[in-house]
Image (cartoon, rainbow, N blue to C red):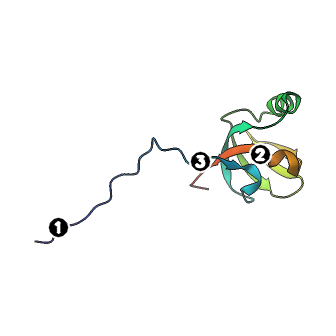
């Protein structure tokens, strides 16, 4: 009798490596991990709803980047989007 090989279930404890927000495409979703910005820029992002661990969707890629957070859309300069690290949602 032949033995069937099965793959082990995916390890949900392994988190993918963060990428820059500007590597995502329009329509993709992600979760913010951190921003490599000066304090004032981080405070402004936070006030707009883009905080650590927030989930978002990229509405428009390019300059400006348009992201939607909790049904609110904000525009980000390409230079800012390049300094925000995110985990892409594999299901988007």
Write the residue at 74% across / 50% down: 21
Pointer 1 residue: 3
Q: Which structural element holds mark 3?
A: loop
- Label 3 or label 2, whichever lies nearer to me, is 3
Res. 33 image quadrant: top right
Image-based side of 91 in relation to 47, left or right? left
Write the residue at 86% across / 51% down: 78
Sequence-wise, the earlier of marks 3 and 2 is 3
Image-based side of 48 in relation to 7, left or right? right
Residue 18 image point, x, y percent: 64, 46
- Label 2 or label 1, whichever lies nearer to me, is 1
Cα separation, mark 3 vs mark 1, equals 35 Å
Q: Residues within 10 Å of mark 3 (few under 14, many from 20)?
A: few
- Residue located farthest toward the bottom when viewing the structure as drawn: 2
- The answer to whether marks 3 and 1 mark residues whose Cβ atoms lie closer than 8 Å is no
User: Split into 4 quadrants, where in the image is the N terminus?
Assistant: bottom left
Cα separation, mark 3 vs mark 2, equals 22 Å
Residue 17 - label = 3
Residue 88 image point, x, y percent: 63, 50
Sequence-wise, the earlier of marks 2 and 1 is 1
Sequence-wise, the earlier of marks 3 and 1 is 1
Pointer 2 residue: 68
Cα separation, mark 2 vs mark 1, equals 49 Å
- Label 3 or label 1, whichever lies nearer to me, is 3
Q: Which structural element holds mark 2?
A: strand
Q: Residues within 10 Å of mark 2 (few under 14, many from 20)?
A: some
Q: Residues within 10 Å of mark 1 (few under 14, many from 20)?
A: few
Image-based side of 68 in relation to 77, left or right? left
Write the residue at 79% across / 44% down: 83
User: Split into 4 quadrants, where in the image is the C terminus?
Assistant: bottom right
Residue 75 - label = none
């Amino acid at each position: 009798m032949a033995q069937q090989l099965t793959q082990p279930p995916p390890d949900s404890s392994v988190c993918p490596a963060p990428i820059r927000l500007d590597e995502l495409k329009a329509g993709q979703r992600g979760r913010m991990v951190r921003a490599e910005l000066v304090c004032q820029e981080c405070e402004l992002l936070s006030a707009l709803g883009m905080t650590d661990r927030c989930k978002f969707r990229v509405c428009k890629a390019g300059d400006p980047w348009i992201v939607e957070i909790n049904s609110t859309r904000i525009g980000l300069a390409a230079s800012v989007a390049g300094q925000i690290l995110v985990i892409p949602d594999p299901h988007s």
